[in-house]
Amino acid sequence: MAIDVPGPVAHYLAADAAMETMTLAQCFDQDAVVRDEGRDYHGLEAIQAWNREAHRKYQYVLELLRATTDGADTRLRVRLTGPFPGSPVEVDYLFTVREEKITSLRIG
């Protein structure tokens, strides 16, 4: 069963699965912020570096379990699987989308 998410979130998920860091960063607004593991990553270059490092460090595969959208906010429940301690793990991704770009992503 396909899970419906806003276009920019769908593009993010596809780029993440393909490990296309540059394409993934293009889903974000120029001034976007990603919050992951207690750190903030501001702007497209920092987001690219964050995604590249996350894939290198965790070698994860993301599986979308469910999604809800309320206005500009989309919450995903995902399962991350890979050769890291505690795998698999389920976490929430909270995206805020405005004008067809992701303006923030909070993971945790």
Image: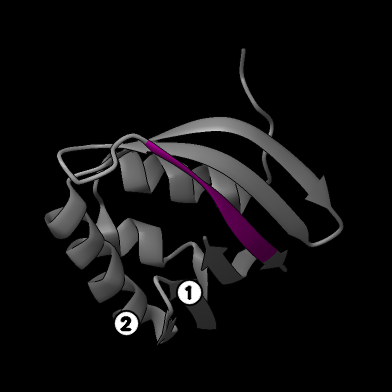
Up the image or down, 46 lies above or below 5; here it is below
Tag 1 near tag 2, CB within 8 Å: yes
Give the residue number, with chain letter if any, for mark 1: 34
Residue at figure coordinates x 39%, y 71% from the top left:
37
Q: Secondary structure at mark 2?
A: helix
| Closest to the observer, 106 or 99 | 106
The range drawn in magenta is 89-96
Give the residue number, with chain letter if any, for mark 2: 46
Q: Main secondary structure of the magenta part?
A: strand
First in residue order: circle 1 vs circle 2 = 1
| Closest to the observer, 41 or 6 | 41
The x, y position of residue 48, in whole percent, is 29, 71
Name which quarter of the figure residue 4 lies in: top right
Circle 1 residues within 10 Å: few <14, some 14–19, many ≥20:
many
Q: Amino acid at mark 1?
A: Val
From where the camera sits, is residue 30 visible? no
The disc at residue 14 is none
Q: Amino acid at mark 2?
A: Ala
Magenta residue check for 28: no
Name which quarter of the figure residue 38 lies in: bottom left
Up the image or down, 83 lies above or below 19; here it is above
Magenta residue check for 92: yes
24 relative to 100 in the view: left or right: left
Nearest to viewer (mark 1 / mark 2): 1
The x, y position of residue 39, in whole percent, is 40, 82
6 relative to 42 in the view: left or right: right
